Amino acid sequence: MSSNRPLVCLVTALVIVTAVACKSGDKTAQSTPVAAVATSAPPRAITAVVGPPATAEPTATPSPSATPRPSDMPATPTPMPRIINGLQIIDEVWVGIVREAGGLRIRSTPRVEASNVVGSVPQNAQVNVSGRVLNGQEAEAGKGTVWLIVGPNQYIYSPPGYIELMR
């Protein structure tokens, strides 16, 4: 009887830990295992295995190709823009790198006017983006009307390829 005592203690401890975890946990939590994803890592496919181990060899998750800009990612639904002074604005925060040769001008409004240039950023400079304006003026024919918000009353024209998502 004394040889089973450590096993009985271990089983009792597991039952107590499980009961405490279930009682203090979220009532809507699932009982199936869920993989955790670090928030700083880029999104990747997660495969959870439930049940007995498979006999087949696991396959590697393919690495993503070139990092798309948030405006190029149709997989997630685009939130409804808010309207401020007639501008359709989508709030999103990310860091990008200017890839356009010669850099980009920063303007006080999302319009191309000689009087609204307030600065510039060189090629390969890092920019902190706080949102997108969907209905700014088209600065270059056929390249769209999307401008990025990089500060209070500071906008950068951003057709595809001008700014690359960094994180």
Image (cartoon, helix red, strand yellow):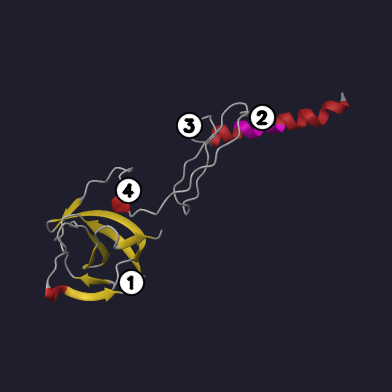
Amino acid type at image mark 2: Val
Q: Nearer the viewer, residue 30 or 40?
A: 40
For the record, the magenta segment spans 13-19
Amino acid type for the residue under numbered disc 4: Met
Q: Main secondary structure of the magenta part?
A: helix
Disc 4 or 1, which lies upstream in sequence? 4
The dot on residue 27 is 3
Which residue is found at the position 12% from the left and 75% from the top? 114
From the image, state whether disc 1 or disc 2 is nearer to you.
1
Q: Residue at x 21, y 55 (%)?
A: 89
CB under 8 Å between discs 4 and 1: no
Rendered location of residue 163, percent (x, y): 31, 62
Residue 50, percent across and down?
56, 29
Residue 149 found in image quarter? bottom left
Q: Is mark 2 on a helix, strand or loop?
A: helix
Q: Mark 2 points at which residue?
A: 15
The alpha-carbon separation of the residues under discs 1 and 3 comes to 51 Å
Q: Point out the tag, 1 or 3, that comes first from the N-terminus.
A: 3
Mark closest to the chain's N terminus, 2 or 4: 2
Crowding at dot 4, Cα within 10 Å, few <14 / some 14-19 / many 20+, comes out as few
Which mark is nearer the camera, 4 or 1? 1
What residue is rendered at 40% in x and 54% in y?
66
Query: CB under 8 Å between callouts 3 and 2?
Result: no
